[in-house]
């Protein structure tokens, strides 16, 4: 599996390195006569392997866009927003041909809505071939507030994936839903008839029958986190319905069917391996699966509230030989400890990325004096904004100190000597600073 993923990644990187780059300069859309500068224009007029980039913060689509040729759509480090305005599905991605590789990355995909007898994928539908056919790579994207409204058959409130060669890496699925009058409403976030999902988070999604993900035999999930998803039917499942799909190093906690905790329902128990599930689930104790009596998550309201809390049994509890991707969902390195962690977040890795919704500020001095003998003080202005947490990492990315409150003295004591990276969360802002302790 890992070799396949890396070959897909390097193939796409080589293919697109020699292609043209174009720039979206318009946030508007025109379905019948798209003009130069519009996203729809560049997709419909792209040459094989073009890279489409943006100098606008958002694009407002009127209807879905079909993507059928090799192209890269890259929202950049600021993550451009593609807004469907509840008009239609956003993207219909079709990669059958073996020469086709479609890459979509660094986008916020919001407010897509499909209304149909068979409503499949509120934000995106991805159809690929087998491993020797076309490929689709969706990386570092946020699927938020999308909906599929079905009269007969609803599959995937945000995403419908079919085919072996769809790869979804470091993606977040928040607050998506299936609705309508259909008896079948399966996968409030995703319906997966195939595809590989790595370091993905599924939270706050809802459907009548399966709140989070409905996964079929050709789908596989590695280091994914499922939390806070809900099915409205009491006899269904809140988090995951696995029809012989493969799950490894995943976490499923606090998912509900109506008001009853129900995280995973699996047709084949052997396909759920080294996962962490609430302790009452029948899968606990089989195939390396562990039980959770309390939440393994840090909590809070910011972007990494589903990262692991200090002391969580999910830390260093993953399959030792599994490294499906070299970073976690925030861009931090895998592996930070003795073994890979369960779930989408690696605990204790150096904070390379601040996260998907958080602004990043480097303001000197946040901590002073620098260098210090071990006692440092926090800028009073930061304290007035409210502190969620302070974390101190050494140069190897090991977490050596966590402080979740701060008194009026604004003092932080670091007892080890060396150079450290300090991460301070204050409201919706993250501050980073390197300090030297002599």
Image: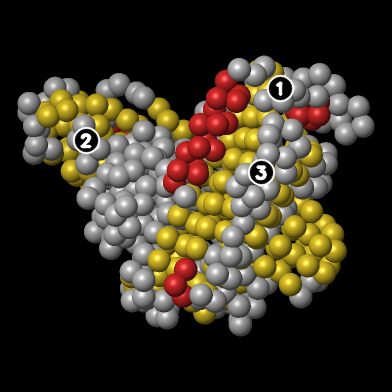
Residue 334: percent from left, percent from top: 34, 43
Q: Is residue 324 above or below residue 430?
A: below
Can residue 407 be seen at all in this image of the molecule? no
Closer to the camera in the image, 219 or 376: 219
Upstream in sequence: badge 3 or badge 1 = 1
Q: Which mark is residue 24?
A: 1
Q: Which mark is residue 396?
A: 2
| Distance from Cα at disc 2 to Cα at disc 1 | 39 Å
Of callouts 2 and 1, the N-terminal one: 1
Determine contact: label 2, label 1, CB under 8 Å.
no
Q: Is residue 85 left or right of residue 74?
A: right
Relative placement, left or right, of 240 versus 352 is right
> Which residue is found at the position 79% from the left and 38% from the top?
65
Q: Residue at x 61, y 52 (%)?
A: 164
Looking at marks 3 and 2 on the same chain, the residue that comes earlier in the sequence is marked by 3
Q: Is residue 435 visible?
A: yes
Q: Residues within 10 Å of mark 2 (few under 14, many from 20)?
A: few
Element on which disc 3 rests = loop
């Amino acid at each position: 599996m890992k070799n396949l993923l890396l070959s897909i990644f390097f193939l796409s990187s080589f293919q697109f390195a020699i292609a043209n780059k174009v720039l979206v300069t318009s946030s508007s859309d025109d379905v019948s006569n798209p003009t130069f500068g519009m996203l729809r224009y560049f997709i419909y007029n792209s040459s094989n392997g073009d890279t489409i980039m943006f100098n606008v913060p958002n694009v407002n689509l009127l209807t879905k866009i079909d993507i059928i040729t090799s192209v890269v759509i890259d929202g950049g480090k600021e993550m451009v927003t593609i807004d469907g305005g509840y008009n239609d599905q956003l993207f219909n991605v079709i990669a059958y041909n073996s020469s086709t590789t479609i890459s979509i990355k660094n986008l916020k995909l919001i407010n897509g809505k499909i209304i149909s007898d068979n409503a499949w994928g509120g934000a995106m539908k991805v159809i690929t071939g087998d491993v020797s056919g076309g490929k689709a790579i969706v990386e570092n994207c946020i699927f938020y507030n999308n909906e599929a409204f079905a009269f007969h058959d609803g599959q995937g409130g945000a995403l419908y994936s079919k085919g072996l060669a769809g790869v979804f890496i470091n993606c977040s699925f928040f607050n998506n839903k299936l609705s309508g009058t259909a008896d079948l409403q399966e996968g409030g976030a995703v319906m997966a008839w195939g595809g590989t999902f790595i370091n993905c988070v599924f939270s706050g999604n809802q459907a009548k029958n399966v709140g989070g993900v409905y996964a079929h035999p050709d789908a596989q999930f590695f280091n994914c986190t499922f939390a806070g998803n809900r099915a409205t039917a009491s006899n269904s499942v809140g988090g995951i319905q696995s029809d012989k799909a493969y799950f490894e190093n995943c976490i499923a906690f606090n998912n509900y069917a109506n008001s009853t905790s129900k995280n995973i329902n699996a047709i084949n128990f052997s396909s759920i391996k080294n996962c962490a599930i609430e302790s009452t689930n029948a899968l606990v104790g089989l195939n390396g699966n562990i039980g959770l009596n309390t939440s393994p998550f840090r909590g809070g309201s910011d972007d990494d509230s589903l990262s692991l809390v200090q002391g969580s049994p999910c830390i260093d509890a993953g399959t030792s030989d599994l490294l499906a991707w070299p970073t976690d969902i925030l861009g931090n390195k895998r592996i930070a400890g003795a073994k890979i962690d369960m779930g989408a977040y690696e605990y204790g890795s150096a904070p390379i990325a601040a996260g998907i919704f958080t602004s990043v500020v480097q303001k000197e001095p946040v901590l002073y004096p620098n260098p210090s003998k071990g006692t440092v003080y926090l800028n009073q202005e930061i304290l007035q904004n409210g502190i969620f947490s302070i974390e101190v990492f050494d140069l190897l990315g090991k977490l050596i100190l966590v402080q979740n409150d701060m008194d009026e003295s604004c003092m932080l004591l670091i007892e080890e000597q060396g150079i450290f990276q300090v991460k301070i969360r204050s409201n919706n802002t993250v501050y980073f600073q390197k300090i030297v302790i002599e």
